[in-house]
Every structure is written in C-alpha cells, then in structure tokens.
C-alpha cells in the first residue's frame, strides 16, 4: 500500500516567518494530496488540497507544490501568525477512498 | 456546514468490556470512516463504509468491527477492549465513490482502556 513520510515532526518559527513542511509518497498511482490542520481538541480540517494534474496551488498565505516525478509535495505557509500553531498532516489518496496520512508536524509560531 | 458528531469526547473502559463508539453526519454523505490517531503514527484507517450495510477493512481492522444500519450513522465496536486500544478515535465522512472528496472529521473520542 501507500507509504507517506512527513518531515519535520516539529517546527518552530518566529511570527511573520515562513514555514515549510515536506512529504513524500510511494505509490505513483496516488492522485490527490490534501493537507489537514488539527487544532487542540478538534478533529483535522482540510486547509488545501492538490490533484495530480496540477503542480502548485495557492490560497492566500498557504500554498502547496507537487512534484509527481520525485513523488513529493510540500506545504508552504507565509507570514505565519500565532493562530497557525497546530498539527499539520499531509495525505495521499489512491482510488476513491484510500487516504493515507503522514505522521504529522507540530508547528509552533512564536509571537 | 458539514457536521460530524461523535457520541463521547472521553471514555474510560475496562479490559474485556464491549465498547461502542457512535458517529453521526448530517450531510447525506455516502462514505464514512473510522481512524485511530496515535502520537508519531498519524491517522490510520480502521474501517470505512461506502453505503448502508456495506463496509471495507482499512489498514488496522483487527480487534474492531463496524455497523452502518442508517446512512447518517456509523458505529465502531470493540468486542473486547484491550489496553493497546487506548487511543484517539476519529470519525469522518465524505461524498460518494466518484471521488476523491474532502473528508470531514468529527472532534474525536479519546478512549482509555484500563
């Protein structure tokens, strides 16, 4: 099955700096790559996603890039704010339902 | 907004007890999922269901069963709870099979088995 690796496991940045989280996947058939944010005491919530026919997608301060040849994708958060502090999960999906998650990155934004 | 609710936020059960975790979604979604979340392991799929009375095993189904008698409700059952099932359990739902579609998560149930 699919194997998704995520790095780093923890990340601390100063408010206003950028944060980058990287993931790799193993199954070349994966075609959907969502990113979820999990705040304390809550379930994960989708923040951005990208499909395999697109190389980059932006939504305000958040962007995701995908390199299908190298089988890696990354989340970029610019101008970080304290409310960005959370655990972030990448995931890769093959087929209609098989979503495989990375192990998570705990991001801390220091005011 | 899609709402996925789980019956309990915290549960404490004894080894050997039968445990029911309930999940309800209000958006008429076809698919429902049960994951467990453990530190350093991310989210791992236990079971999913793509229709009423239909179910498929995920990556870690051992020790668990599920029930989906109504479209909006998906139950996770621990037939005989063990300490290694102490974990956070997350339910999710999404639109039908012609995906992929965003999965919407509930707030989770933290289960402790003593």
Image (cartoon, rainbow, N blue to C red):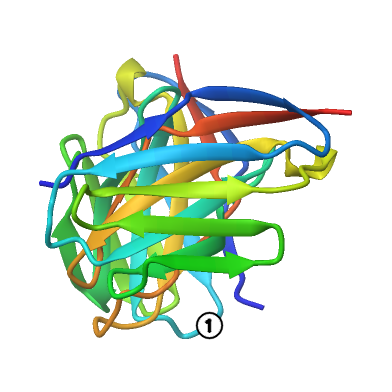
Task: Give the residue displayed 36% in from the left and 40% down from the top.
Answer: A23
Q: Position of residue A107 (x, y in %)?
A: 64, 31
Tell me if A16 is positioned left or right of B41 in this view: right
* Residue, disc 1: B27
Task: Give the residue displayed 37% in from the left and 66% down from the top.
Answer: A55
Tell me if B21 is positioned left or right of B15 in this view: right
Give residue A69's quadrant in the image: bottom left
Q: Secondary structure at mark 1?
A: loop
Task: Give the residue displayed 61% in from the left and 70% down from the top.
Answer: B3
Give residue B64's quadrant in the image: top left
Residue A32 position (above or below residue B86): below
Tell me if A90 is positioned left or right of B108 in this view: left
> Quarter holding the N terminus of chain B?
bottom right
Residue B81 position (above or below residue A93): above
Residue B101 position (above or below residue A90): below
> Quarter holding the C terminus of chain B?
top left
Q: Position of residue B38 (x, y in %)?
A: 42, 27
Task: Give the residue displayed 56% in from the left and 79% down from the top.
Answer: B26
Which chain is mark 1 on? B
Residue A60 visible in the snapshot: yes
Tell me if A2 is positioned left or right of A65 in this view: left
């Amino acid at each position: 099955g699919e194997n998704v690796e995520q790095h780093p496991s923890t990340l601390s940045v100063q408010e206003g700096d950028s944060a980058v989280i990287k993931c790799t996947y193993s199954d070349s058939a994966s075609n959907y790559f969502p990113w979820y944010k999990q705040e304390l005491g809550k379930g994960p919530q989708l923040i951005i996603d990208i499909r395999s026919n697109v190389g980059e997608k932006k939504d305000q301060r958040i962007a995701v890039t995908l390199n299908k040849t190298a089988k890696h994708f990354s989340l970029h958060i610019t101008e970080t704010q304290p409310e960005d502090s959370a655990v972030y999960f990448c995931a890769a999906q093959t087929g209609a339902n098989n979503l495989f998650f990375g192990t998570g990155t705990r991001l801390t934004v220091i005011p | 907004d899609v709402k996925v609710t789980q019956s309990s936020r915290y549960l404490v059960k004894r080894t050997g007890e039968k445990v029911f975790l309930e999940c309800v979604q209000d958006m008429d979604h076809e698919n429902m999922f049960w994951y467990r979340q453990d530190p350093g392991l991310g989210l791992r799929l236990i079971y999913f269901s793509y229709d009423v009375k239909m179910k498929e095993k995920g990556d870690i189904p051992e020790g668990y069963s599920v029930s989906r008698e109504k479209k909006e409700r998906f139950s996770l059952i621990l037939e005989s709870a063990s300490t290694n099932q102490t974990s956070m359990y997350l339910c999710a739902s999404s639109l039908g099979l012609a995906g992929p579609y965003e999965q919407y998560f509930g707030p989770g149930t933290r289960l402790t088995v003593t």
